[in-house]
Image: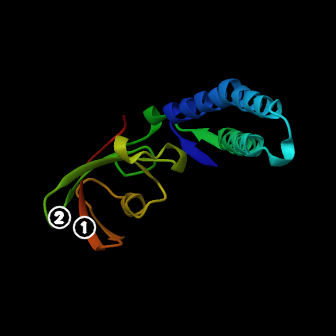
């Protein structure tokens, strides 16, 4: 089961719709166009179009599986006393004082540019269950960092 926000779920549904209604017909049209160019035994354009269609169908099926397995979390019912999935966590690196804010999300919603990290990451795993004022010791490839939790909220 994949826990996610309503926003994340809606994005996946929109992505699936776009794949099925726009990308799938475009892939079929590319195959038909390549087929019209003649001899299929030496037609690399046809082979590439068929491969693209197969990859697209695989992605569509994966997305359908994630959507059917999704459990939407109502953030209004969550308490901000401990870090959990969909928590927006503000923290400070104890060693250098640098502050950062991450929202802990499902694997499918992770987007570092938006400050959304997967619940599977070492940082998220180290933060889960912690309270404001707690210091999480997190092993990262460069060693161990200490992050003091300064605020927990939900967007």
- Residue 97 seen by the camera: yes
- Crowd rating for badge 2 (residues with CA inside 10 Å; few <14, some 14–19, many 20+): some
- Crowd rating for badge 1 (residues with CA inside 10 Å; few <14, some 14–19, many 20+): some
Q: Residue at x 38, y 52 (%)?
A: 83
- Residue 115 seen by the camera: no
Q: Secondary structure at mark 2?
A: loop
Q: Position of residue 84 (x, y in %)?
A: 43, 50
- Is the residue 35 above or below the residue 119 in the image? above
Q: Secondary structure at mark 1?
A: strand
Residue position for label 2: 94
Q: Residue at x 49, y 31 (%)?
A: 7
Residue 146's label in the rendered image is 1
Residue furthest top in the image: 21
Q: Residue at x 37, y 38 (%)?
A: 154
**51 sits left or right of 150 in the view:** right
**Contact, mark 1 vs mark 2 (Cβ under 8 Å):** yes
Q: Position of residue 58 (x, y in %)?
A: 72, 45
């Amino acid at each position: 089961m994949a826990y996610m926000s309503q926003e994340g779920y809606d994005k996946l549904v929109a992505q699936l719709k776009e794949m099925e209604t726009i990308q799938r017909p475009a892939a079929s049209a590319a195959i038909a166009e390549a087929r019209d160019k003649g001899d299929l035994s030496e037609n690399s354009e046809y082979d590439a179009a068929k491969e693209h269609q197969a990859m697209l169908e695989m992605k569509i099926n994966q997305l359908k599986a994630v959507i059917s397995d999704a459990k939407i979390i109502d953030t209004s019912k969550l308490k901000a006393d401990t870090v959990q999935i969909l928590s927006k966590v503000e923290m400070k690196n104890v060693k250098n004082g640098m502050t950062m804010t991450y929202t802990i999300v499902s694997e499918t919603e992770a987007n570092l540019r938006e400050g959304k990290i997967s619940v599977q990451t070492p940082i998220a795993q180290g933060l889960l269950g912690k309270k404001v004022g707690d210091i999480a010791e997190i092993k990262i490839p460069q060693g161990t960092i200490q992050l003091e939790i300064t605020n927990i909220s939900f967007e």
